[in-house]
Amino acid sequence: MLFNMIHPIRRKDLFRLGLVLVLAAAARFYHLGTSEYHYDHAVLSQMAQQMVETRTLATLGMITSVGVPNTPTSVYVVALAYVFTADPLLVNAFLIALNVAGVGLLWLLAHRYFRPGVGLAAGLLYALNPWAIFYSRGIWAQDFLTPFMLAGAVSAANGCAGKTATSPSLATTSRRQSACRYSSGSQM
């Protein structure tokens, strides 16, 4: 099963992680002022600013191209930055920092549950991928989903590996192991 082997993080691994994060940050923060800022970016910014100014929670997100509203999650995330600044450039920097954290989460997931070399390769590929860099530099609803998805994946992997904050009961452990076996395909 995938989660039986957990590779520990050593000092040299932290150095490699630091290198990956520095490269990811340098690539994403380079010429910050040249980031895209179009209609969708402005609408999301406006919704987040309105939420901060009126102190009310948004109930819907941006309307998609097919007319269906997104969830307000992206508005909430962007509003976190607008609490501290009204400058879209600094908000963009906040979202870039989230995406750099996502690079670290991918490294962590690949390092711990596959191999340290896989973690380094995955981290470098994600840190320096031109499309990943491009899509991590904007205030757009889809530009910062990856860090949250990776945080969920790390959390799920930790749960399957038995790395929980509290000691679960026997029934909870049994359910978790069943869910992890099913999700990893070992019950086929």
Image (cartoon, grey):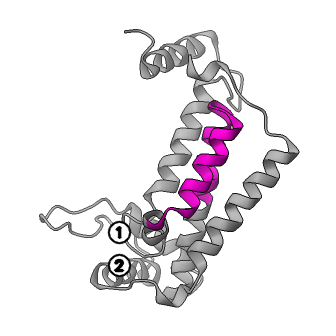
- Callout 2–callout 1 Cβ contact below 8 Å: yes
Secondary structure beneath dot 1 equals: loop
Give the residues in magenta: 101-130
Task: Decide which of tag 2 and tag 1 comes sooner along the chain.
Answer: 2
Depth check: 69 or 64 in front? Answer: 64
Look at 70% across and 27% down and name the residue there. 6
What is the count of numbered marks? Answer: 2
Residue where numbered disc 2 is placed: 47
Q: Is residue 132 left or right of residue 31?
A: left
Residue 121: x and y in percent read: 62, 47
Q: Is residue 32 above or below residue 102?
A: below
Q: Is residue 99 left or right of residue 5?
A: left
The answer to whether any part of residue 19 appears in the image is yes
Main structural element of the magenta stretch: helix, strand or loop? helix
Depth check: 134 or 37 in front? Answer: 134
Amino acid found under the numbered disc labelled 2: Met
Is 170 in the magenta? no
Look at 73% across and 53% down and name the residue there. 17
Amino acid found under the numbered disc labelled 1: Ala
The answer to whether any part of residue 86 appears in the image is no
Residue where numbered disc 1 is placed: 58
Q: Is residue 180 left or right of residue 40?
A: right
Residue 21: x and y in percent read: 68, 62
Quadrant, the N terminus: top right
Please tell me in which quadrant of the rendered image residue 24 appears. Answer: bottom right
